[in-house]
Amino acid sequence: MADLTSLQAGFRNILKIPELRNRILFMLALLACYRVGSFIPTPGIDTQALQTFFDQQGGTIFGMFDMFVGGNLSRLSIFALGIMPYITASIILQLLTVVWPYLERLSKEGELGRKKINQYTRYLTVALSSFQGFFTAVALEQTTSTPLIVPNPGWGFRLMTMVTLTTGTVLVMWLGEQITERGIGNGISLIIFAGIVVGLPGAAGSLFAEWQMGERTVFTILFLLAMMLAVTAGIVTVERAQRRIPVQYAKRVMGRRMYGGQATHLPLRVNSGGVIPVIFAASIVAFPSTLGMVFQGEWVQSLTQQLSQGYPLYNLLYIGGIVFFTFFYVSIIFNPDEVADNIRKYGGYIPGIRPGRRTSEYIDTVLSRLTTVGALYLVVVCLIPEFLITGFKVQPIPFIGPPLDNFLTTYDLDFITTGIGINFYFGGTSLLIVVAVAMDTVQQIESQLLMRHYEGFLKKGRVRGRRG
């Protein structure tokens, strides 16, 4: 009861602060615009035939990609590509920043350099969106279904689809940037968050309908709910976990006043990358499957199948992508040399560690260990629930695959390779994004309230987001 009263007081405090209230209303208004655009179809498409096609793709990578864009892909709305081209462009620019001296110099020029890199990211987003939009049109024309998804194929349809989808992606990118700048929270993450959340009621309704028709047992549903609660609890625990490195500041006399002398700590989060590595990895593994819809050939189709949900190659690339982008993203947002230099500059030191290079090495070692744990946590959270969705396809594994598949079939353990066929909305990736983005947004609102000497949502403790 006390927590409910505190929550109500928190909402009342939000309404008392004009700037915070306007930021939240602005964010909600732009998210509403995004949802309205999600129901504007791309011209030249038979929506019923397209929906039938995507119903057959529910257990593949296209089902997960459709979840990220809030169902826009299965409807082929003007926002069908979603924010993924912008994320892919950001990945490319961040990778080039490491290897291209020009971009590396820009990244060190502060706000001006950051704006220039953002401008290049927008240009690359337009190029990638045009490329994906064109080949999406070609893939839809080549899809054989009754009735046809594209009743009148040709260059007119291809160019119109390319321009429509590119314009939609640019608009989504602009909405995300406006939310980040003038709203509350990270705009890109909130757009993906909104796309997932709006699908949860429909997914729950489908699960209930399957139970009524006898396709699901009560035990299966209870097991699914228990897994969701366990995964959510694990996400909240790890997202709030941090390693506090003690820092002692020496006393300094400036004029007639004495400064320093206090002990504080340097908080290092277990999962400093948040949901960004997962989104990056998902966008990378989805790209080859998109090309497989366009290019024909036995080896292309074989590669596309190997990159389908649950297959060994997909799992390896997904795991590798998550681990790589976790370390890569943390290396971008956290510089141990800069932190050690700032500590030394203000007369601080870590007890038992010499200032300067030794401090930097110590912080880097601790951060590397925490990042390793954070990467493994992301892998477990994303893959274990997806095992329940599609299972792990062991058949393609050389030498041991076929015998292991026969063994599992003989002893009625088929669920290991087939899963239980639940919806992607109940998977670990979607839960991670929803919980992490919600915690981060609430933490920013808390910071705004506390900065103005108002009580936040919680009195006993504070919500620590990704940037905690």
Image (tube, grey):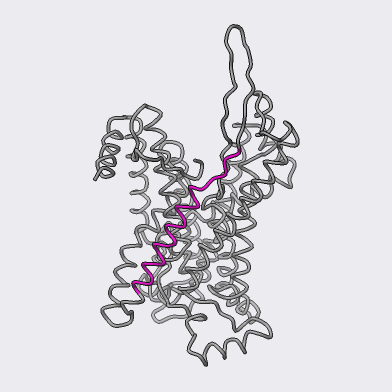
Residue 201 placement: quadrant: bottom left
Residue found at the very far top of the displayed protein: 256
The residue drawn where x is 61% and y is 42% is 333
Looking at the rendered structure, the number of numbered marks drawn on it comes to 0
Along the viewing direction, whichever of 114 and 382 lies nearer the viewer: 382
Residue 399 placement: quadrant: bottom right
In percent of width and height, residue 284 lies at: 59, 61
In percent of width and height, residue 35 lies at: 35, 54
Q: Write down the region rendered in magenta.
A: 221-245
In percent of width and height, residue 411 lies at: 51, 90
The image shows residue 184, relative to residue 400, as above or below, that is above
Tell me: 394 left or right of 72.
right
The residue drawn where x is 47% and y is 42% is 177
Tell me: 98 left or right of 6.
right
Residue 21 in view: yes
Residue 145 placement: quadrant: bottom left
In percent of width and height, residue 341 lies at: 69, 30
Tell me: 440 left or right of 1.
right
Q: Is residue 305 covered in magenta?
A: no
Along the viewing direction, whichever of 136 and 247 lies nearer the viewer: 247
The residue drawn where x is 29% and y is 42% is 7
Q: Magenta region's main secondary structure?
A: helix
Residue 42 in view: no
Residue found at the very far front of the displayed protein: 352
Q: Is residue 242 covered in magenta?
A: yes
